[in-house]
Amino acid sequence: MKSLIAFHNILKKDINNYYLKPPNISWGIIFPLSWTLMQLFRSVDSNILELLPGLISTSILFGTTSMLAVTITFERSGRSFERLLLAPISLNTLMLAKITGTILFGIFNAFVPIIFASFFINLSDINWIIVILAVFLIAITSSLTGLLVAVSAQQVFEAQTISNFFRFPMLFLCGLFIPVSSLPEFLKPISYCLPLTYGADILKGAINNNNFLPYKLCLIMLLIFTIGLFTISKYIIEKKQNR
Amino acid sequence: MTMISVKNLIKKYGDFAAVNDVSFDVKKGEIFGFLGPNGAGKTSTINMMIGLLKPNSGRITINEIDVIKQTKKAQEIMGIVADESNLYNEMNGFENLCFCGALYGMKKKEREHKARELLKLFKLTDASTKTFKSYSKGMKRKLTIAAALIHSPKILFLDEPTTGIDVESSRQIRELLLQLKNNGTTIFITTHYIEEAERLCDRIAFIVQGKIVASGTISELMDKITQNHNVHIITNKDVQDYITDFQKCFKESKVSLKKPNKLVIETEKRIPLLPILKFFQEKEIEVYEAKEIHPSLEEVFIKLTGIETSVLQKEKGGF
Ligand SMILES: Nc1ncnc2c1ncn2[C@@H]1O[C@H](COP(=O)(O)OP(=O)(O)OP(=O)(O)O)[C@@H](O)[C@H]1O
Ligand SMILES: [Mg+2]
């Protein structure tokens, strides 16, 4: 019960202090929107449906990773994060509370291109249950990737730099824009090490029916990434206390 | 009853031992002060006691809870004031306090009630709806202390609570700490202000380069350096000519003249004043003042640590 109160209030504080702040809301809408428009103009003749998985994934990836750089690294440099570490709540509860806000933000981000696309095309053939599941899992793994960067970096600036260092390569290696099968041989293994590869593949399956991996495998891989990233982040936070 | 027990605590950063075999006990309801210069290891010690930093070795128990093994359980009864005001800039005073209460699992009604009470106690009610970032340094520190008290902790840890803030806020903070102590809260405080330690603390430990050089109540610390008793006497006229006579009458004492009408009598054991007064009366000399002088805590600190007190005040600004 006590943990629940703490969890709820950490989440509420983050939403009020960060996610609902005008700059972040507008980033959450404008970024996916302009990304969507850019892709549409670039390839007028292409099918919007074909682009949708990429747009959704990109929106989630950028939304979540940029936010955690703020909500954690910023609080760490201002030392208010110490307060959370010193509260009588488990580290698991604390980490869950911190990423739940980001996951929600990621899901919100994902629906910007979807809603936008719905004005132009018929989306009734899409398997929505699978899409929502994929969006949820991509949001979780992206948030956890962001968490890992946020707890490793010392400053907001550093966290953002590291984020960019892996975000862009990740986009091009995850099979969204270039199918994994057409990647040079030496890049393929890297592609299989990225959570986004599996998340994007589920989306492609649900929206365009052209996934190249079975759903089950993707789900298992995403679950493994979730547990793995969570454990590593937790380990880093604990290790920092032993400096 | 022992509330805090620290045994053989060691913290190394690389090869450098910042805290080097520190042991002490704090009794329930007392204010215990850690007094030491910059880099002495005060913050490192406090951070280990609150479970933020892991020691290399040693034991810490708080209310009989092992802090290293049962960190979260121990943290439930701790109030913690870090050496920086670390609340949330975007939130106002009231919201900050309520949030801190929620972290300790307090229900909405309970934490809001306590928050209002604390804002009043700290004279911050008017500022309760202003954002934390708009507060002055002194107000920030007061709210940070209030936040540490929201869940009514049994033990309060404060790392240099009055460093770098205005005189009036410092005074208010000291007054509140004494009030808390009277209500039974155990307080562990670090400071580099001798005066503050003297005014607040029941017991003090001097810490220098990671080691406790001396500890005890103020009078115990003073006893450590005073072997002799000093009585100083002020008269109405020049007593220079009577010194030899005086020395003959009081053989166990050592007399020295500080001014023509001021002398200091040093003795191993305490001596009664009446014979001294009579001696001067016979010579038709009036004695205006006769009192035993004690060393100041500052002198004790200098003698025991070999550190000039000016070093303590450096960098952080005095009272
Ligand atoms: N994370 C760290 N890594 C390396 N050395 C450190 C670290 N933290 C503290 N130290 C060193 O350990 C020593 C003790 O530091 P500590 O902060 O505990 O001192 P302090 O008594 O609180 O000083 P101050 O009055 O300046 O706050 C100092 O020499 C400091 O440089
Ligand atoms: Mg310090």
Image (tube, coloured by chain):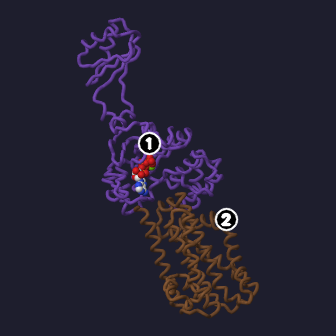
For the question of whether residue B186 can be seen, the reply is no
Q: In the rendered structure, which amino acid carries the disc numbered 1?
A: His
Q: Is residue B263 shown left or right of residue A191?
A: left
Q: Dot 1, crowdedness within 10 Å: few (<14), some or many (≥20)?
A: many
**Ligand 1 within 8 angstroms of badge 2 C-beta:** no
Please identify which colour was used for chain B in the image. purple
Subunit under mark 1: B
Q: Nearer the viewer, residue B133 or B96?
A: B133
For the question of whether residue B288 can be seen, the reply is yes
Q: What is the secondary structure assignment of the residue under circle 2? A: loop
Chain corresponding to brown in the figure: A
At a point 64% along the width and 85% down the height, the residue shown is A53
| Residue A17 quadrant | bottom right
Q: Nearer the viewer, residue B88 or B62?
A: B88
- Image coordinates of residue B13 in percent, x first then y, are 38, 57
Give the distance between the C-alpha atoms of the residues marked 1 and 2, in whole angstroms.
41 Å
- Image coordinates of residue B315 in percent, x first then y, are 48, 43
At a point 54% along the width and 62% down the height, the residue shown is A155
Farthest residue toward the right? A119
- Image coordinates of residue B76 in percent, x first then y, are 45, 59
Q: In the rendered structure, which amino acid carries the disc numbered 2?
A: Lys
At a point 69% along the width and 80% down the height, the residue shown is A113
Q: Dot 2, crowdedness within 10 Å: few (<14), some or many (≥20)?
A: few
Quarter that holds the C terminus of chain A = bottom left
Q: Which of B52 and B29 is in front in this view?
A: B52
Evaluate whether label 1 is on the same chain as label 2: no
Quick check: B206 above or below A84? above
Subunit under mark 2: A
Give me the disc on residue A21. 2
Which residue bears the numbered disc 1? B192
Quick check: A162 above or below B287? below
- Image coordinates of residue A178 in percent, x first then y, are 60, 87
